[in-house]
Amino acid sequence: MRTSAGLSAGSAASLLGVDRGKISNIESGARAISPERLRVLARACACTDASLVDALVDMAQPTTRGWWEQYREALPSKLGDIAELEFHAVRMRAAYSMHVPGLLQTPDHALALFRVVIPALSERDIALRLAHRLERQATLNGPSATPYTGIIHEAALRMQFGGASVARAQLLHLIDKSEQPNVRLLVIPFEAGAIPGAGQTVLYAEGPVPGLDTVQIDNSHGPDFLHSDSQLAKYRAHLDWMENVALQPERARDFIRAIARQL
């Protein structure tokens, strides 16, 4: 909001009566901002979207520590950011070409992935990452489960991470999860041909208002988070394209069953 308005961090600091370093800490989420100061900043930025300002104020309210905070010192901070993003999303859409979505992975599948990280992880780090991933999956379960659409390419379904038996168990787990009312699982077969962003992992997390939507993509150096209007529009178009060429839920389940029988 500040950068879109062309307001410098120094000017924002003067406006709010804080030093410039606190602005950086507020914007990174390391320091809280009062609702009153947030509304002052919004007015200075000429933000007329009342629903966005109200949503930002809600975010600024004191809350209990999220479960992911216990991992902040032990794991890369961006893994905690992913968990926090998923937890607060009101709806998620994700597309995977080479991997099964983390929220739908079995423990054995996840372990197979963690054991091929470069540089190699210690057994302690592997155990921590596994525990963190399994706790993330709670967002798809229970009475307040988040609506989730997962788009998986056939290539990911045929990757035998951990061997044939682990892969088969993972495929059967996908079928089970796809039958949950909040989970919509689609499959892009090889025959669908070229798709935009092929090979890229994309999570589109919808916030309580469109201005708080966020895209998270995976890279070898770690996750990146995107939030500009042009970036969000680009990835919405990517996901819409993929959904249009993908096998819909019932056919997708049959497709996954057929691959599982081959293992």
Image (cartoon, rainbow, N blue to C red):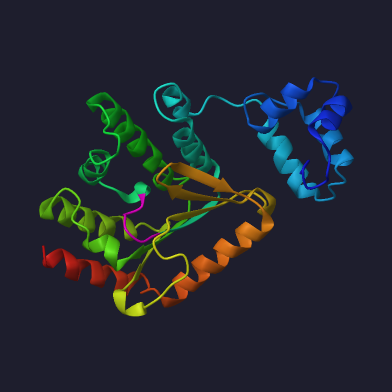
Give the answer, above or below, for where 61 lies relative to 44.
above
Residue 153: x and y, percent?
Answer: 33, 66
Rendered residue at 26%/44% (across/down): 113
Rendered residue at 36%/57% (across/down): 180
The quadrant where residue 134 appears = top left
In this orientation, which residue lies closer to the viewer: 234 or 108?
234
Q: Which quadrant does the N terminus fall into?
A: top right
In this orientation, which residue lies closer to the viewer: 68 or 226?
226
Residue 262: x and y, percent?
Answer: 11, 67
> What's the magenta bit mostly, secondary-structure-wise?
loop
Residue 110: x and y, percent?
Answer: 26, 43
Q: Is residue 208 magenta?
A: no
Give the answer, above or below, for where 114 lies relative to 125.
below
The mark tally for this picture is 0
127 left or right of 247?
left
Q: Which quadrant does the C terminus fall into?
A: bottom left
47 left or right of 198?
right
Rendered residue at 86%/33% (across/down): 40
> What residue span does the magenta drawing correspond to?
96-101
In this orientation, which residue lies closer to the viewer: 254 or 122?
122
Residue farthest to the front? Answer: 119
In this orientation, which residue lies closer to the viewer: 11 or 102?
11
Rendered residue at 71%/39% (across/down): 56
Give the answer, above or below, for where 109 lies relative to 59.
below
Residue 120: x and y, percent?
Answer: 26, 33
